[in-house]
Amino acid sequence: MQVTANGDVLTLDDAATAADLLTHLGLGAGWVLVERNGEPIERHLLASTALVEGDRIELVRAVAGG
């Protein structure tokens, strides 16, 4: 299936979850906020949130500073 993540079209397995997408991109769930089709996904739901063809994902890296 194809999804769009931060404007880039990616091809993933048909059964991919939001957590699988992060693994595919080499990102850790603890450092990334994930939004699917305009709705945030809670971290504890990433592994159980199935992606579907055409999903639009926005990923924002959490940063700390002062």
Image (spheres, rainbow, N blue to C red):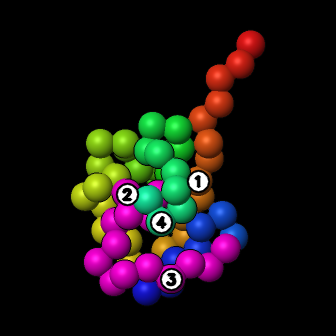
**Residue at position x 45%, y 37% from top?**
30
Q: Which residues are magenta?
A: 8-22
The 10 Å Cα crowd at callout 4, few under 14, some 14 to 19, many 20 or more, is few
x 60%, y 35%: residue: 62
Q: Amino acid at mark 3?
A: Thr
Residue 47 seen in this snapshot: yes
Kind of residue sitting beneath label 4: His
- Which residue corresponds to the image point at 44% horizontal and 44% vertical from the top-left? 29
Residue annotated with mark 2: 19
Q: Residues within 10 Å of mark 2 (few under 14, many from 20)?
A: many
Q: What is the secondary structure assignment of the residue under circle 3?
A: strand
Q: Amino acid at mark 1?
A: Leu
**Vertical arrangement, residue 61 with respect to residue 56, above or below:** above
Task: Quarter of the image for the C terminus: give it.
Answer: top right
Left or right of 12: which side holds 15? left
Which image quadrant for residue 43?
A: top left
| Residue 11 disc label | 3
SS class of the residue under badge 1? strand
User: Where residue 19 sits in the image (x, y, percent)?
Assistant: 37, 57
Q: Is the C-beta separation of discs 4 and 3 under 8 Å?
A: no
Does the segment drawn in magenta span residue 15? yes
Q: Which residue is mark 4?
A: 24
Crowding at label 1, few (<14), some or many (≥20) Cα neighbours within 10 Å? some
Q: Residues within 10 Å of mark 3 (few under 14, many from 20)?
A: some
Which amino acid lies under the numbered mark 2 shown in the image of this protein?
Ala
Of marks 3 and 1, the one in the foreground: 3
Task: Indicate which disc residue 59 carries.
Answer: 1
Mark 2 vs 1: CB contact within 8 A: no
Q: Earlier in the sequence, mark 4 or mark 3?
A: 3
Say which label, 3 or 1, has the lower sequence index: 3
Taking the image as shown, residue 39 lies to the left or right of residue 19, namely right
Residue farthest along the right direction in this orientation: 66
